[in-house]
């Protein structure tokens, strides 16, 4: 067992050792950058007494500032630990509280987006006029920086009394319907003509062809799209939270951090966003594997 | 079979009935008086001409012209004095009729053999229909301009604020986006070339690249604004971080796209690393590189605009959007969005044209012809 693990870690074709090395290199770079970027401030502060400070004191100082230009990794981890484990999750100072707000809006928007994307895909596959008229606009919608107007949409929806999760979810929906539609259209068209002909010899209705052939055939495509969609759904939610100010979420946390120069808070919020993003994508991957196994896929 | 049945489905008939019934229904309230089509003889005659053309003309082109005439008949009806809303049932019924006719015309064109003209015309018609309905509904229900301005108001804002919009465009697009796009892609590509030579680095970077796609990198915007100030440099930095990984991952995939046999052939020619790279592997990587460039063109514009929310000089698209949204002048916000949309689509379109010019030999293009 142990030898297996060791073999996996140190084998020339394994990925663990290279990844660990690259991550370690990034961490070392980070510490060096922290020294370089924070140097002048710390030096100015320490030499206030008149005597030039020792180099080791300045280096130690650059890794322990209150509001550093670039916080050292251990400061970020410490802040992250403090705001997740040591504070009760229901407190407004807890990152878990903010992450939960963001995650729930993300998942709501993702659900909206998947439903919208699937409906559009079903329409495009079955109605030729929709295929020819709508499809180019759906592709063009990707080149429009919708994310840029996210804060404005929040303000507008707020002015007609829509507050809370739903406005943020609408932005996420707008972002994540696109990959779902594209993937689903591809998936619904993936059954080969032989299978469609077979369904015709059974005199299956369009409804039956859809549910018994096209839908199951599209599932692998759907999951590939959903993994992309949930990641951009999170981005949409975070950007959507920027103008809502005090009402919470990772985006609001970023904004207050940037207003008050709390760099450590910004970085720990970023760390939380990164963790949240990867958890959502990996969870989607897990659901994908379970579903495909239940459907009898060999993959 | 199904298609044949659909041809008998009288969508055009329903549309005609909608318009004809509307002739007996009110178009709105004017000074406490209910008004009908007969108060608007010119519009009524225009509508009749359009309806006649739509109902009897056999050629799709003629029906298209008739559709435009019928649509034009509704345009002069909403005036400032006319109260519409739900009391204007005739107007809405006629509008539904026109929309249904628009659908039948699109269906006619969609049923014809594909060519370049129709591939442009059908989506164009669909877009026009959406703008037309948007205008009609916002005007008809008197939706306040702070919620949703009309397309004409947005067009007017583009005309009036052209100088401001041009300044914003220069600040955001010509400075931040282009610089960031160039730099980020270059760094990503250079890293890929480096990683390609050192397999150990490649195996370390690839999983990180996949991980990065799940991470909302745009969150570094406030930090970059703190580091590089309010100018365009901070936006460029955000863009570099955002587009680095898509370029890296795609370039690595592209550099590995050359197949074994071709590589062996190059080897048998005694080609050096540089020759193999230039003559075989880079051309094979082009489709992947263009894929990354197209993804990154969208990301770059988003990155610049969102970074401007965290601080910018008094120009820039993101700055304009947040300031004008705070002042509730939404027509200017939408004008900025329209500029951003056109700029983004043009950017993407240019890249797509370049892709076609450089990778015309690729199977994905050859298959189309």
Image: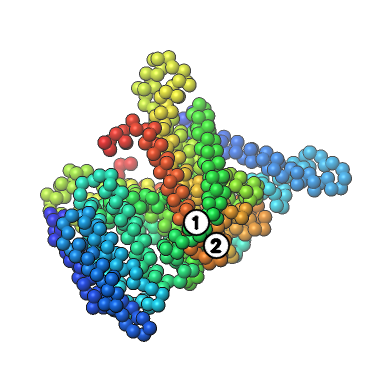
Q: Is residue B34 left or right of residue B239?
A: left
Whether residue B348 is visible, yes or no, is yes
- The residue that appears at 23% across and 64% down in the rendered structure is B50
Name the residue at 66% across, 55% down: A262
First in sequence, mark 2 or 1: give its number. 2
- Circle 1 packing at 10 Å, graded few (<14), some (14-19), many (20+), is many
Foreground of the two, B159 or A83 = B159
| Residue tagged 1 | B336
Count all numbered tags in the image, as a single digit: 2
Say above or below: B315 vs B200.
below
The spot of residue B204 in percent (x, y) is 52, 35
Residue A95, relative to residue A195: is it above or below?
below
Q: Is residue A80 visible?
A: no
Residue occupying the far right of the picture: A50
The quadrant holding residue B40 is: bottom left
Proximity of marks 2 and 1: CB atoms separated by less than 8 Å: yes
């Amino acid at each position: 067992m142990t030898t297996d693990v060791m073999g996996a870690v140190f084998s020339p074709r394994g990925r663990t050792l290279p990844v660990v090395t690259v991550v370690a290199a990034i961490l070392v770079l980070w510490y060096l950058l922290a020294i370089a970027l924070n140097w002048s401030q710390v030096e100015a502060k320490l030499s206030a007494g008149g005597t030039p400070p020792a180099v080791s004191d300045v280096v130690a100082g650059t890794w322990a500032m209150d509001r550093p230009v670039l916080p050292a990794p251990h400061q970020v981890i410490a802040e992250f630990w403090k705001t997740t484990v040591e504070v009760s999750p229901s407190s407004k100072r807890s990152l878990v509280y903010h992450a939960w707000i963001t995650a729930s809006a993300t998942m709501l928007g993702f659900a909206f987006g998947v439903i919208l994307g699937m409906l559009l895909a079903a329409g495009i596959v079955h109605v030729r006029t929709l295929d020819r008229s709508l499809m180019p606009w759906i592709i063009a919608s990707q080149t429009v920086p919708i994310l840029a107007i996210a804060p404005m949409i929040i303000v507008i929806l707020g002015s007609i009394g829509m507050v809370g999760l739903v406005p943020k979810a609408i932005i996420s929906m707008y972002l994540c319907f696109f990959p779902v539609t594209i993937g689903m259209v591809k998936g619904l068209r993936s059954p080969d003509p032989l299978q469609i002909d077979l369904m015709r010899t059974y005199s299956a209705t369009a409804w039956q062809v859809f549910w018994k052939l096209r839908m199951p055939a599209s599932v692998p495509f759907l999951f590939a799209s959903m993994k992309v969609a949930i990641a951009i759904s999170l981005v949409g939610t975070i950007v959507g939270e920027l103008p809502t100010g005090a009402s919470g979420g990772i985006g609001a946390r970023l904004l207050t951090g940037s207003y008050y120069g709390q760099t450590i808070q910004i970085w720990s919020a970023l760390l939380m966003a990164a963790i949240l993003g990867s958890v959502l994508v990996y969870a989607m991957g897990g659901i994908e594997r379970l579903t495909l196994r239940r459907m009898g896929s060999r993959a | 079979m199904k298609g044949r049945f659909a041809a008998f489905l009288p969508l055009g008939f329903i549309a005609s009935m909608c318009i004809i019934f509307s002739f007996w229904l009110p178009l709105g309230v004017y000074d406490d008086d209910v008004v009908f089509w007969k108060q608007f003889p010119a519009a009524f005659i225009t509508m009749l001409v359009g309806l006649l053309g739509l109902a009897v003309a056999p050629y799709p082109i003629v029906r298209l012209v008739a559709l435009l005439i019928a649509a034009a008949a509704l345009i002069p009806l909403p005036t400032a004095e006319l109260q519409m809303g739900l009391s204007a049932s005739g107007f809405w019924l006629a509008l539904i009729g026109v929309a249904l006719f628009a659908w039948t015309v699109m269906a006619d064109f969609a049923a014809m053999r594909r060519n370049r003209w129709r591939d442009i015309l059908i989506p164009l018609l669909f877009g026009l229909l959406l703008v037309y309905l948007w205008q009609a509904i916002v005007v008809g229900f008197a939706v306040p301009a702070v919620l949703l301005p009309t397309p004409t108001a947005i067009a007017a804002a583009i005309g009036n604020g052209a100088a401001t919009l041009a300044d914003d465009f220069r600040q955001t697009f010509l400075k931040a986006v282009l610089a960031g796009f160039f730099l980020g892609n270059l760094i990503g590509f250079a890293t890929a070339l480096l990683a390609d030579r050192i397999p150990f680095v490649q195996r370390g970077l690839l999983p990180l690249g996949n991980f990065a796609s799940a991470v909302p990198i745009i969150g570094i915007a406030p930090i970059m604004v703190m580091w590089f100030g309010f100018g365009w440099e901070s936006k460029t930095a955000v863009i570099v971080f955002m587009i680095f990984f898509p370029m890296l991952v795609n370039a690595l995939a592209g550099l590995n796209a050359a197949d074994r046999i071709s590589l062996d052939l190059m080897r048998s020619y005694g080609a050096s690393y540089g020759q193999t790279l230039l003559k075989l592997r880079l051309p094979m990587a082009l489709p992947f590189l263009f894929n990354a460039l197209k993804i990154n063109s969208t990301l770059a514009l988003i990155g610049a605009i969102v970074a401007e929310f965290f601080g910018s000089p008094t120009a820039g698209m993101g700055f304009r959007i947040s300031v004008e949204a705070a002042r509730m002048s939404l027509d200017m916000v939408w004008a900025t969005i329209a500029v951003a949309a056109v700029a983004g689509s043009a950017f993407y379109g240019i890249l797509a044209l370049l892709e076609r010019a450089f990778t015309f030999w690729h199977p994905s293009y050859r298959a189309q012809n």
